[in-house]
C-alpha cells in the first residue's frame, strides 16, 4: 500500500508590518515540523505547512503591494484587531503560532492568549523573535517577548545575549533558540556585472534628520555622476503613502525632487533578494540588507560618514571589517569582511551550517507538540505582581485588561468595514501620516530653537 500523506502542520502568523510579515511567514516555513531547507517557503503549498496569516490592524498594516513584494503565499490572509485575533485563537486549532510583532504587542498577545486558552487542554507552540539586528532596547524588547515557548535568536551572538538577559533577571532562559535570519539565501556573488551596480539600501528612520538624509542622497548622486559607467540604485522600502515597521518622516522620494540626478541613477523597489542578484556593491547605514548581502559574499559597506553610533545602529557592525566612508569608496576601497565576525552573525555560513540552522527549532517544536499532557500555561516574566506599573499600560494599548481579558468597548470586527468606515479609516491614516511626516518634524525643529 502507498505510504499515507503526512498531515500538513497548521501554523498561524500574526504580524503588524510588512517586514514582520516577511519574517514571520518565512520563519513559519523554516520551523514547520517535518519541513526541510530543501522544501523552502517558495515551494508548492502542498509540501509546506498550512499557513494562515493575520495582519494586526494599525498604522503599519501592509498594503497589497508590500505583501506581494514579500512573495510568501498564505492559505488565508486577513486583517484583524487584537481582540478578534484572540477570539479566533480561542476557537481554532493550530500547531504553531508565530507572533511577528513589536515587543509590546507580543506581551499583550501572550497575556491575552493565556486567558483565551485557560480552559483548553491543548494549545499551539508559541514562537516569537526579531526581524533583524538587535541593536537597541535589548532588555526591554526581550522581557516583553518572554513567555513564548520559543524566542528565536538570529545568531550565536544574539542567543548568548538573550540568555544572559533572562538569567540576569531570574527568568527562565530555556525558550531561547538559535536559528538564523529566515530570508537569507540566493546565489553567491560570482563577480562584477555589466554595468557595475552600486545599491544604497535606504532605511525609513535611519538617519532621522533632513540634513543627514540629504547628505547621504547627495553623496549617492555624486557617486553616480563621477561614475557614469556604473548603475547607481537607491533601493527604497516603501512607496509614498505606505508605512513600514518604522515611520519615515522624510522619504527620499521627496528629497530627490530637488536634485537633477544623472541618467545612471534610479529609484527601485521590489524584493531585496532580486535587487541583490544584480548588485556589485551594497551600501547602507545599518540595514538588515547588509546581512543578506554579506551572506551572498557581495561587497558590503556600512557607512561611517555620520559616525559610528548607537542611534544609527551601525555600531553593531564594529569588528565586521565593513565600515567605510563615501570618500573611501570613491577612492576605490573595497571591504573585506572579518570571517569570525560574520560567522557569529549567522551569515556567510559555509559547510551547510545555514541549511541546518533551523533544525534545533523544528526538533524543539516537535517535542513540545508531543509532550504528554499537552503544554503548560504561558508564563511571561511580566505579571501584575512583577510589573504592576508597566504591564497594565501595555495591555491597555491592545484593549486588554490587567488579566488579559478584552476591555469593554474593545474593537472586534466581525465583518468587512462598510464604505463609510473605510473612508473614515483612510482619512484617519492620512491625518496620522500628515502629522508624522509634516507636523511632527516642524514641532521638533521649533523645540530645538
Image (tube, rainbow, N blue to C red):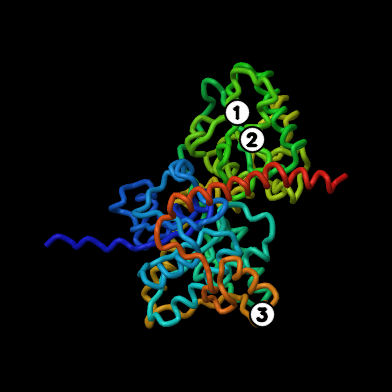
C-alpha distance separating marks 2 and 3: 44 Å
Q: In the rendered image of this protein, does residue 270 appear above or below residue 421? A: above
Residue at the image point whose x is 57% and y is 75% from the top: 401
- Sooner in the amino-acid sequence: mark 2 or mark 1: 1
From the viewer's perspective, tell me whether residue 318 is left or right of residue 99. Answer: right
Indicate which disc, 2 or 3, sits on the residue closer to the N terminus: 2
Q: In this image, 174 relative to 134: left or right?
A: left
- Asked whether residue 144 is in view, the answer is yes
Of 419 and 165, nearer the camera is 419
Q: CA distance from mark 2 to mark 1?
A: 7 Å
Q: Are marks 2 and 1 in contact (CB under 8 Å)?
A: yes
Q: Residues within 10 Å of mark 3 (few under 14, many from 20)?
A: few
Q: Measuring 53% from the left and 47% from the top, which residue is drawn there?
A: 426
Query: How far across and how far down the image is residue 400, in percent?
Result: 56, 72
Q: Label 1 neighbourhood size at 10 Å, few (<14), some (14-19), many (20+)?
A: many
Point out the image quarter for the N terminus: bottom left
Residue positioned 62% across, 75% down in the render = 382
Picture coordinates of residue 13, whole percent (x, y): 44, 59
**Is disc 3 placed on a helix, strand or loop?**
loop
Residue at the spot of label 3 = 386
Can residue 338 be seen from the camera position used here?
no
Check disc 1 and report the residue beneath it: 198
Give the CA distance from mark 1 to mark 3.
50 Å
Please provide percent x and percent y for residue 384: 63, 80
Residue pointed to by mark 2: 283
Which quadrant: the C terminus? top right
Residue found farthest to the front: 420
- Report crowding for label 2: few under 14, some 14 to 19, many 20 or more residues within 10 A (C-alpha): many
Q: Quadrant of residue 371?
A: bottom left
Task: Tell me: 165 left or right of 191.
Answer: right
Amino acid at each position: 500500500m502507498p505510504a499515507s500523506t503526512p498531515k500538513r502542520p497548521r501554523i498561524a502568523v500574526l504580524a503588524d508590518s510588512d517586514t514582520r510579515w516577511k519574517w514571520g511567514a518565512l520563519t513559519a516555513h523554516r520551523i514547520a515540523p517535518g519541513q526541510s531547507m530543501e522544501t523552502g517557503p517558495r515551494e508548492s503549498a502542498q509540501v509546506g505547512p498550512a499557513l494562515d496569516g493575520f495582519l494586526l490592524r494599525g498604522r503599519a498594516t501592509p498594503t497589497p503591494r508590500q505583501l506581494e513584494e514579500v512573495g510568501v503565499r498564505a492559505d488565508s490572509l486577513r486583517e484583524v484587531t487584537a481582540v478578534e485575533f484572540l477570539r479566533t485563537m480561542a476557537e481554532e486549532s493550530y500547531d504553531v503560532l508565530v507572533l511577528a510583532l513589536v515587543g509590546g504587542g507580543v506581551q499583550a498577545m501572550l497575556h491575552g492568549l493565556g486567558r483565551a486558552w485557560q480552559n483548553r487542554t491543548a494549545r499551539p507552540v508559541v514562537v516569537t523573535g526579531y526581524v533583524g539586528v538587535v541593536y537597541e532596547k535589548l532588555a526591554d524588547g526581550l522581557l516583553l517577548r518572554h513567555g513564548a515557548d520559543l524566542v528565536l535568536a538570529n545568531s550565536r551572538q544574539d542567543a548568548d545575549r538573550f540568555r544572559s538577559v533572562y538569567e540576569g533577571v531570574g527568568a527562565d532562559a530555556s525558550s531561547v533558540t538559535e536559528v538564523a535570519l529566515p530570508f537569507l539565501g540566493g546565489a553567491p556573488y560570482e563577480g562584477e556585472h555589466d554595468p557595475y551596480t552600486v545599491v544604497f539600501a535606504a532605511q525609513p528612520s535611519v538617519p532621522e534628520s533632513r540634513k543627514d538624509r540629504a547628505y547621504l542622497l547627495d553623496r549617492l548622486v555624486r557617486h553616480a555622476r563621477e561614475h557614469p559607467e556604473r548603475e547607481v540604485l537607491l533601493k527604497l522600502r516603501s512607496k509614498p503613502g505606505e508605512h513600514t515597521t518604522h515611520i519615515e518622516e522624510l522619504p527620499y522620494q521627496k528629497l530627490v525632487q530637488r536634485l537633477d540626478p544623472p541618467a545612471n541613477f534610479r529609484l527601485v523597489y521590489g524584493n531585496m533578494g532580486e535587487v541583490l542578484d544584480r548588485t556589485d556593491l551594497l551600501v547602507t547605514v545599518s540595514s538588515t540588507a547588509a546581512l543578506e548581502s554579506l551572506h551572498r559574499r557581495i561587497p558590503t559597506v556600512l557607512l561611517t560618514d555620520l559616525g559610528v553610533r548607537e542611534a544609527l545602529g551601525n555600531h553593531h557592525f564594529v569588528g565586521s571589517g565593513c565600515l567605510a566612508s563615501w570618500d573611501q569608496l570613491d577612492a576605490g576601497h573595497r571591504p573585506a569582511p572579518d570571517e569570525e565576525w560574520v560567522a557569529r552573525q549567522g551569515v556567510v555560513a559555509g559547510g551547510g551550517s545555514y541549511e541546518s540552522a533551523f533544525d534545533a527549532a523544528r526538533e524543539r517544536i516537535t517535542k513540545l507538540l508531543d509532550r504528554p499532557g499537552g503544554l503548560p500555561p504561558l508564563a511571561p516574566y511580566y505579571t501584575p505582581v512583577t510589573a504592576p506599573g508597566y504591564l497594565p499600560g501595555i495591555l491597555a494599548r491592545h484593549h486588554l485588561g490587567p488579566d488579559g481579558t478584552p476591555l469593554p468597548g474593545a474593537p472586534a470586527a466581525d465583518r468587512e468595514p462598510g464604505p463609510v468606515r473605510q473612508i473614515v479609516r483612510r482619512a484617519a491614516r492620512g491625518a496620522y501620516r500628515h502629522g508624522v511626516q509634516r507636523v511632527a518634524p516642524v514641532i521638533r525643529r521649533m523645540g530645538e530653537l
